[in-house]
Image (cartoon, rainbow, N blue to C red):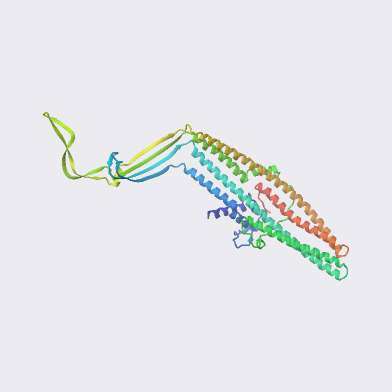
Amino acid sequence: MKRVAMMRTVANRLFRSPKWLAGVLLVSAAYAQPTQSAGPNSNRFSLRQAIDIALQNNLTVKQGQLQVQNSDLQFYQAKMNRIPTLNAFGSQAFSSGRNINPTTNTFVERAVSSNNYQLSTSVTVFNGFAIQNNIKQTDLFLQSSEESLKATQNTVALTVVQNYLNVLNNEDQLDIARRQVEATRGQVERTQRLVNAGTVAEATLYDIRAQLANDELAIVNAQNNLDLAKLALLQTMNLPGTGSPGAIEVERIQFDDPAVAPYTASPQQVYETALGIMPEIKAAELRVKSDALGIDVARASMYPSLTLNGNLSTLYSSVGLQRLVSDGTLIQQPVPGLFVNMNGTPQQVFQTQQGGTFVPYAYGEQLRNNLNRSVSLNLRIPIFNNMQARTRVTSATITKQNSEIAADNARLQLRQQIEQAYTNMLASANRYRATQVQVASLEQAFRAAESRLNAGALNSVDYNIAKTNLDRSRANLVQAKYDYIFRTKILDFYQNKPLSF
């Protein structure tokens, strides 16, 4: 349940925060109508559903979630290291022959059964601030893990968006191919009538029918490309692609033809903005800070440490001290070796004792009578420990330097990605503009060729060439349109801009 709630939170961020590119591409209806996640038997997906499912099923995301959980556990343990430890100890022993009475510390010739109980506690008073620095270190590492998870989720979301747009693009390509077939069929019918009237040679009809066959083949190819695009989308969502990928559907997103205009920011401006918002950069910088504190934690082993200890113990022995149970009588017993001189005559000294019998102390009485309490303050001063402390410090320093290089590499990769994205955006813009002009020109040329063909002034070969050029140009225009849209949104994503259509 915790994982599901976490993924739902991520999905909501995808569609509320402009920082997440995936939420950009939804039309207003998607915001007005909250959609449910597609179940295993559903064959229709919205962009939001596709992203939700991909984030839930992606194995790299799951690994990132486990890393966050582990980092959170380490942070929790670091905080728990501040509180005292408490341990209990108990033992049961039995021995025979010559033994030491644990209550009198004298030898006895009999079997002895004994119990020993201890309760000890210890708290660190000072250890070179290792505990405090370790808490800060694990906290920063936890934040770094969370940012790394966000970066992974970004990558998954971007892949879903790209594959989703690829499906839409191939659907448009299939629609263009079908319209081309309908147009060619109409031309076949017109040519048939002209042939029947004797206005056009029958060879022209054969050429038009050949063009129809080519257009029908284009439908098959477009359908195959669409199935492959849908399969790629299913695989991105980590859903089985067995059976017919064409059985699934995606919700359409209506795109207006984009207006090609110079981008408002330079690559350097995009990069400077991205440095402060991209999670992979934050993760790398937090890791450097965490490893810097790791040096302080390692250096703490070179300082004295002070601990406060407390101990509570007691014991029981079957040959322990016994107590006298009086029967009310008095007994005169001589004191061995004690005499007094009375009128020159030594006289034995007697002592009066209560009469009765000796019985062992009860179990609970022995435990209470033998109770011992102690408190100690222990100081440990490291003098020489085989260079282990200095080795740990050096190792922690190397780890920090490696993290700094990793952070520099993350910034370098970000710069290169932005430069590549900017270059791709310019190339797609130029291609889109050129393809628009090409389509407009070829549409005029095709209309002229179609009129001349109907009038019998153009042969079928030239007509087919004009139609093929127009069909290819229209397909290229659709591809250029989607490519330009995606490239511009990538740059907007790096700048944390509100993205909408």
Q: Residue furthest front?
A: 97
Report which quarter residue 326 is drawn in: top left
Check the picture and name the quadrant holding the C terminus. bottom right
Residue situated in front as seen by the camera: 314 or 84: 314
Give x and y (percent) for residue 347. Answer: 13, 33
Callout count: 0
The residue that appears at 54% across and 54% down in the rendered structure is 3
Give x and y (percent) for residue 281. Answer: 62, 43
Q: Is residue 288 above or below residue 45?
A: above
Residue situated in front as seen by the camera: 41 or 319: 319
Give x and y (percent) for residue 223. Answer: 71, 61
The residue that appears at 38% across and 43% down in the rendered structure is 119
Q: Residue furthest bottom?
A: 196
Residue situated in front as seen by the camera: 202 or 51: 202
Report which quarter residue 112 is drawn in: top left
Q: Residue furthest left?
A: 343
Q: Is residue 350 above or below residue 472?
A: above
Residue situated in front as seen by the camera: 147 or 500: 147
Relative horizontal placement of residue 11, taking residue 357 as reference (left or right) = right
Report which quarter residue 106 is drawn in: top left
Relative horizontal placement of residue 419, taking residue 382 as reference (left or right) = right
Give x and y (percent) for residue 126. Answer: 46, 36
Res. 254 in view: no
Res. 454 in view: yes
